[in-house]
Amino acid sequence: MVANEKVALITGAGQGIGEGIALQLAKDGFAVSLAGRHLEKVQKVADKINADGGKAIAIEADVQYKQQVFDAVTKTVSELGQLNVFVNNAGIAHVAQVCDTTEEDMDRLLNINVKGTLFGIQAAAAQFKKQGTPGKIINASSIAGHEGFELLGGYSATKFAIRGLTQAAAKELAQDKITVNAYCPGIVLTPMWDQIDAELGELHNVAPGESIKSYLAGIALGRGETPADVANLVSFLASEKADYITGQAIMVDGGLIYR
């Protein structure tokens, strides 16, 4: 490891927003540890970063299991030398009306989105304290963590919870020079939003494509979001420029929700 080279661990880094964050932090000069449930996916992203001259490793880890999160930190430090930034990106969505959300669906949302974030905060903080260094923890909330969204009630509840964890951890860890913040993406054009569009269409009896078109029309900047848009905010929060920011859940949605 190069002296003073900073290391970031990103969960859920095998696709979508997580992949975008991994690629951006590698461009920023971080050695990156990419964790995900499917090793082949995170390995593919790691291979891309290494081929471009960066430094990346891939780790199989399911964030709903505490020991796997802690083991991911241990392996990261073993192979890359330290930990400076932990990005709790892993998460899932579930599209259903509140009255149709099953106990099993809600348990899975809570286990991955909320408990996974809690375990990430705990593992990162323990490592930063062990090193005796400052650190940055960056969590994935959502615009649905500021306003409950139709057909995303369970998901919205978990993203509100992540904001609460972010604020509480920021207060508790400030004395250790550890900052805790969250990013709140808007309508990122992924398969999840295709599913939401289809189910909203059924609910309101409108043609496919019309529901998401109405959401996109409400975005002040006039377009849907890309993973790179989210990664740019995470890049800032991971940098020294954000050293005096903690406990915040920052919107990156093109101007859709104003809170």
Image: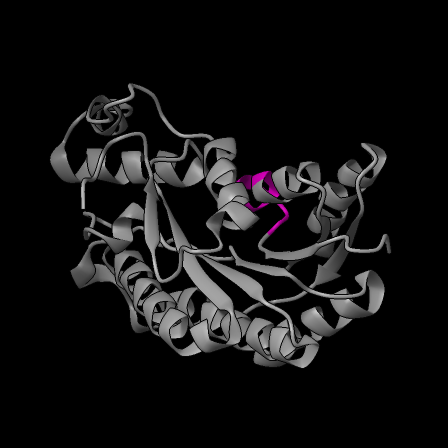
* Residue ID at (13%, 35%): 204
Q: Position of residue 11 (x, y in %)?
A: 59, 58
Q: Position of residue 254 (x, y in %)?
A: 31, 30
Q: Is residue 160 left or right of residue 135?
A: left
Taking depth in this image into account, of 24 and 5 the one nearest to the observer is 5
Q: Position of residue 38 (x, y in %)?
A: 67, 56
* Residue ID at (65%, 76%): 132
In the image, residue 229 above or below residue 220: below
* Residue ID at (30%, 68%): 164
Question: Bounds of the magenta span?
Answer: 13-20
Q: Position of residue 34 (x, y in %)?
A: 68, 54
Determine which quarter of the picture holds residue 219.
top left
Taking depth in this image into account, of 3 and 107 the one nearest to the observer is 3
Q: Is residue 133 left or right of residue 139?
A: right
In the image, residue 198 above or below residue 74: above
Q: Residue furthest left?
A: 204
Q: Quadrant of the N terminus?
A: bottom right
* Residue ID at (28%, 46%): 143
Whether 19 is among the magenta residues is yes
Assign the magenta stretch its main secondary structure: helix
Whether 225 is among the magenta residues is no
- Indicate how the structure is coloured in the image: one colour
In the image, residue 199 above or below residue 138: above
Q: Is residue 220 left or right of residue 89?
A: left
Whether residue 65 is visible to the viewer of this picture, yes or no, is no
Whether residue 194 is visible to the viewer of this picture, yes or no, is yes
Q: Is residue 105 left or right of residue 78?
A: left
